[in-house]
Image (spheres, rainbow, N blue to C red):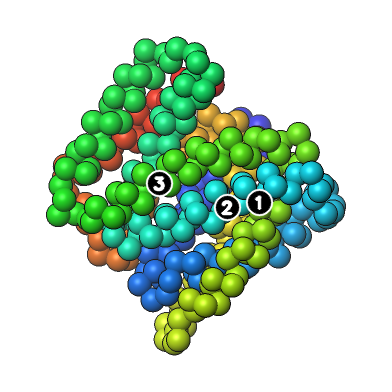
Amino acid sequence: MKRNQKTSHLLMILLLLIWTADAVTVSAAVSAMPEIFLLCFKTLCSIPVLMLFVRFREGLRLPKRGTIPSLVLAALLGDVFYFFFEYSAYRYLPIGQVTVLLGIMPVFSYLTDCLIRRSRPRLSILAASAGSAAGLALIVWDSRAGSLLGYVCCAVCVALWIAYGYAARRLDRDYSPEAITLYESVIAAVCMLPFALAARPAVISARDLWLGIVGMGALTAGIGYIIEVRGLIDLGTTVSGIYLNFLPVLTAAAGFLFLHQTMTARQMIGGLIVIACGVFVVLKDK
């Protein structure tokens, strides 16, 4: 194994730990403040990190005027609405359950691509899709473990992420992934700031929660993204995708240890099915 690949494998493990800690922090924070305030605050914390990274990698410059509408659309879909609904889901469902439900995205992304391109999907991936649907049915079946609103928020997240993927692809010819992320973060922060200020909590008593939000804002949306980009470059989309499909396992364990959240045996089985099918789709769709 090449040295840079070994380092990237270690960094991907670190990324899983960072995003797990972020899920715990957000799940705790949404009970103390509105989602839009939390999301805007975290985005603002990430911008300096992204600016430094882009500055040293390729230099800072203003976006091209003709691409601004596409940047705004991508920022609204992927940076504002997607995370708003994800954070809302944390209000109603355990964090492990949310990440498992969002693990269906590789399957739906593949099927959406086939539909748009009018191509016939592979039978093996159709079988994996059916398996994912069965796993989701097991998770949703037990209504005692969460609110219907949480499942609706997760479904909206999947749709938004697929739409964001198509919006972001229009920008690949003009910018690097790092620059796209920086521009989107700035646009998202500007769009959210008036609503965040209007929804700001009157009192924040948990000082450690604030420190966690600042830390996770810089780590997850800043350093975390840099690690993700390096993993994509050094390891490829398949290996990186496999790593990220195991995020629900860590978040479920973290939710149990730190937030005393639990999932039923039926939901854990369904979650393992969804994860396994997601890994299969990532391996086959390459």
**256 relative to 196 in the view: left or right:** left
Q: Please give the residue where the numbered disc 2 appears in the rendered image.
A: 76
Marks 2 and 1 in Cβ contact (< 8 Å): yes
159, 110: nearer the viewer: 159
Q: Please give the residue where the numbered disc 1 appears in the rendered image.
A: 72
The amino acid type, in three-letter code, at marker 1 is: Val
The amino acid type, in three-letter code, at marker 2 is: Leu
Q: Would residue 88 be visible to someone looking at this image?
A: yes
Alpha carbons under labels 2 and 3: distance apart: 14 Å
Q: Is residue 195 above or below residue 179?
A: below
Residue at the spot 58% in from the left edge and 52% down from the top edge:
76
Alpha carbons under labels 2 and 1: distance apart: 6 Å
Q: Is residue 41 above or below residue 278?
A: below
Which image quarter holds the C terminus?
top right
Residue at the spot 54% in from the left edge and 71% down from the top edge:
195
How many residues crowd mark 2 within 10 Å: few (<14), some (14–19), many (20+)? many
Q: Secondary structure at mark 3?
A: helix
Image x and y of residue 218, in percent: 60, 64
Rendered image: mark on residue 156: 3
Report how many numbered discs are placed on residues in the image. Answer: 3
How many residues crowd mark 1 within 10 Å: few (<14), some (14–19), many (20+)? many
85, 274: nearer the viewer: 85
Q: Is residue 14 above or below residue 167?
A: below
